[in-house]
């Protein structure tokens, strides 16, 4: 635990160094110091958090807790006062202020605060016994003697336990020895459960059920032990029995719903959570788990409604903020998602998944450095977190740092060798580096691990296209479309593969489909225009380039391609206007310089032609190969266009 807290503190040190006015970082570091027992450093950090955010209720609360640990109860009470002023429904603040009054011997004030906390739903007895073995323990340690009424508020009684057991069974048991055994097995089972010793717990619940076969609560508790052991069917059998014996037990429905959720049966889980909420309308965890089940069904709006309710009932529910953020991210609302992940991290600084998912949200916003910071933090908190390495690799890849990306994908694969996504992502990085064979090996492995992995087929197809193997590319695109029929990019890229094969009608069919799926896709209009140009249907090509420009007026490619269409229609003046615009938008646009040079040739503007062709050549264009793709020779160009090139220009375009 200490090592983990040290890692957390180091991570927030780095966060503060990068952003010295980040309130959450000071608060979270202070919380870590508080857990370590370094109260003075904790107080310094809470001071800074409060300086940056004067209405930060939980910072006052935690600073008060630190002062209490230092036996500075007057200062603690001042902070609890402020926390309650800012957040009047904070039962924990009332409880802790009540304890501070106890230490100061202010019995009536202590009783008032403890009563308020209890009435607000706080389990003050359990909270008290986390810090003290008993009321006597507190009295001995602090040299005080509590009034009997206060002591009674904080002292668990055997009689109350006995009463609880009898109430749960619902009838009297005449054999007192049997009752004592029943209570012993049942309570020891619960104690074993709390310690994580589930086999021992199950054995004790077995004994309790053997003594009293109608003991619904024992079935329910044994079911939760099976749930922890991932024995979901046995758990469900026990929850069924508990519900049969006690049909109005919200907890049993909730637990059975949880088991169905673990079995990946979200519809049955939701039915049980519905019933639990019907029986207990303020059942926070039932709303939370039902929201999680809706997430599994991709019903994000319904999930958000449930997380909203859970947060309304418990405004400090970090996991509910986290899951709501996840839902917003899946809805493509990254700003709202990040806001929720921020809140989750403030409330629960070691919530690793929140950093990972916030990183993904930043990645989707193209904020790669902030994404990497979050993945760094996730890895700092959990060094064997394969998904965080995979996601950080994606961020480095998008930053055009493929070597760093591949290192992260390697680590992700080492930690999780059967993770298809890591192989797929590493393949993309290799493809970016033009290491096509290694890329294809990774895509092969991804498909071996996950035979229905549409993205891996798509990426392998794209790599085959780069290798100029259109037939193999098309096979992969076909498979990707079979698995994911509504993916625009796959139709677009299959269209390009057909274009390389000169199958223009099939090219246009694919681009038509892509446009049908996404009518505002600029790239697809541009690509279909290229296909029409290759077919010789220049007017239809120009219509598509017009549409691409309408959708994206700063699209240099569309202007360049429309210019090419105008050249082929013999409208060289229009062509030059388009090439001018393309170069204005993209000053180093080699293709536009080359094409404008060719247009000048048609207009016999030799010096301008020479200037543009020379520029394109000096920028790395193989102008001779491009020229000879369309013309057999300079003489062929001259004959087709009725011009005679000057010797120096002819030499620039002649094969040697």
Image (tube, grey):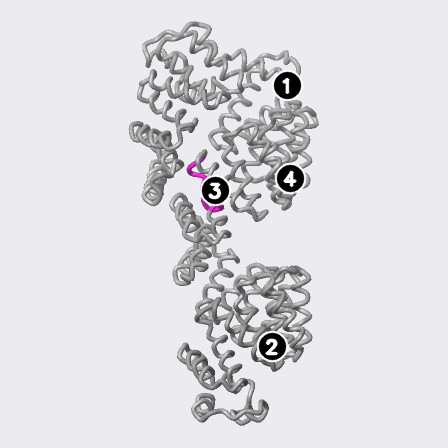
Secondary structure state at the residue bearing disc 3: helix
Q: Is 577 situated left or right of 140 in this image?
A: right
Residue 126 at x, y = what percent?
A: 47, 20
- Mark 1–mark 2 contact, CB under 8 Å? no
- Mark 4–mark 2 contact, CB under 8 Å? no
Q: Quadrant of residue 222?
A: top right
User: Of the residues under marks 3 and 1, which one precedes in the sequence?
Assistant: 1
Identify which residue, 81 or 14, lies in the foreground.
Answer: 81
Identify which residue, 99 or 341, lies in the foreground.
Answer: 341
Identify which residue, 503 or 384, lies in the foreground.
Answer: 503
Residue under circle 1? 169
Residue 587 at x, y = what percent?
A: 44, 69
In the displayed structure, 107 sits above or below 363; it is above
Q: Residue at x 46, y 22 (%)?
A: 92
User: Of the residues under marks 1 and 4, which one precedes in the sequence?
Assistant: 1
- Mark 3–mark 1 contact, CB under 8 Å? no
Q: CA distance from mark 1 to mark 4?
A: 37 Å
Residue under circle 4? 302
Q: Is 106 situated left or right of 478 in this image?
A: left
Q: CA distance from mark 1 to mark 2?
A: 86 Å
Residue 565 numbered tag: 2
Q: CA distance from mark 3 to mark 1?
A: 42 Å
Question: From the viewer's perspective, is the residue at label 3 or at label 1 nearer?
Answer: 3
Residue 354 numbered tag: 3
- Segment tinted magenta in the rendering: 348-358
Q: Is residue 351 magenta?
A: yes
The quadrant of the rendering that contains the N terminus is top left
Q: CA distance from mark 3 to mark 2?
A: 51 Å
Identify which residue, 486 or 291, lies in the foreground.
Answer: 486
> What secondary structure is the magenta-colored segment mainly?
helix
User: Of the residues under marks 3 and 2, which one precedes in the sequence?
Assistant: 3
């Amino acid at each position: 635990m200490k090592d983990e807290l040290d890692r957390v503190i180091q991570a927030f040190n780095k966060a503060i160094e990068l952003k010295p006015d980040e309130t959450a970082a000071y608060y979270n570091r202070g919380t870590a110091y508080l857990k370590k027992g370094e109260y003075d450093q904790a107080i310094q950090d809470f001071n800074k958090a409060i300086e940056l955010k004067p209405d930060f209720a939980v910072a006052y609360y935690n600073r008060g807790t630190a002062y209490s640990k230092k036996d500075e109860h007057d200062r603690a009470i001042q902070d609890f006062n402020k926390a309650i002023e800012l957040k009047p429904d904070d039962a924990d603040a009332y409880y802790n202020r009540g304890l501070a009054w106890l230490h100061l011997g202010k019995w009536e004030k202590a009783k008032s605060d403890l009563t308020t906390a209890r009435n607000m739903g706080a389990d003050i007895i359990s909270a008290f016994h986390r810090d003290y073995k008993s009321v006597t323990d507190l009295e001995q340690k602090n040299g005080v003697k509590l009034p009997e009424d206060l002591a009674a508020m904080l002292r668990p009684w055997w009689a109350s336990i006995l009463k609880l057991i009898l109430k749960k069974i619902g009838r009297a048991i005449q054999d007192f020895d049997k009752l004592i055994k029943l209570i012993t097995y049942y309570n020891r089972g619960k104690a074993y459960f709390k310690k994580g010793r589930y086999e021992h717990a199950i054995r004790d619940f077995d004994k309790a059920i053997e003594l009293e076969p109608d003991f619904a609560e024992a079935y329910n508790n044994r079911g939760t032990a099976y749930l922890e052991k991932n024995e979901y069917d046995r758990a469900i059998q026990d929850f069924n029995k508990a519900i049969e014996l006690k049909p109005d037990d919200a907890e049993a429905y909730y637990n059975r719903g949880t088991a169905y959720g673990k079995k990946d049966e979200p519809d049955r889980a939701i039915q049980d959570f519905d019933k639990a909420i019907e029986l207990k309308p303020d059942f926070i965890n039932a709303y939370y788990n039902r929201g999680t089940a809706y997430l599994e069904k991709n019903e994000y709006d319904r999930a958000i409604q449930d997380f909203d309710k859970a947060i309304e009932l418990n405004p400090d529910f970090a996991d509910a903020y986290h899951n709501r953020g996840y839902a917003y991210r899946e809805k493509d609302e990254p700003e709202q998602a990040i806001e929720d992940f921020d809140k989750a991290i403030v409330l629960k600084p070691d919530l690793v998944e929140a950093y990972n998912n916030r990183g993904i949200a930043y990645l989707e916003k193209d904020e790669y450095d902030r994404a990497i910071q979050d993945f760094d933090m996730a890895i700092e908190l959990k060094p064997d977190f394969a998904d965080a390495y995979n996601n950080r690799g994606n961020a480095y890849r998008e930053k055009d740092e493929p070597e760093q990306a591949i290192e992260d994908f390697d680590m992700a694969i080492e930690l999780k060798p059967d993770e298809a996504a890591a192989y797929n992502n590493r393949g993309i990085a290799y493809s970016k580096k033009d290491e096509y064979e290694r890329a294809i090996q990774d895509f092969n492995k991804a498909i071996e691990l996950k035979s229905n992995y549409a993205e891996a087929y798509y990426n392998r197809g794209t790599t085959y296209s780069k290798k100029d193997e259109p037939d193999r590319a098309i096979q992969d695109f076909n498979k990707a479309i079979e698995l994911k029929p509504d993916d625009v990019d796959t139709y677009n890229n299959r269209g390009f593969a057909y274009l390389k094969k000169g199958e223009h009608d099939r090219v246009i069919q694919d681009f038509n489909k892509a446009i049908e799926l996404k009518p505002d896709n600029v790239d697809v209009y541009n690509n279909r225009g290229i296909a029409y140009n290759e077919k010789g249907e220049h007017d239809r090509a120009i219509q598509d380039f017009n549409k691409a420009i309408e959708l994206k007026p700063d699209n240099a490619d569309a202007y360049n391609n429309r210019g090419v269409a105008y050249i082929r229609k013999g409208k060289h003046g229009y062509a030059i206007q388009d090439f001018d615009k393309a170069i204005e938008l993209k000053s180093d646009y080699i293709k536009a310089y080359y094409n404008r040079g060719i247009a000048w040739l048609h207009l016999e503007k030799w010096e301008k032609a020479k200037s543009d062709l020379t520029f394109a050549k000096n920028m790395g264009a193989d102008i001779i190969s491009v020229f000879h793709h369309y013309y057999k020779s300079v003489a062929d160009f001259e004959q087709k266009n009725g011009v005679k090139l000057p010797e120096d220009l002819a030499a620039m375009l002649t094969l040697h």
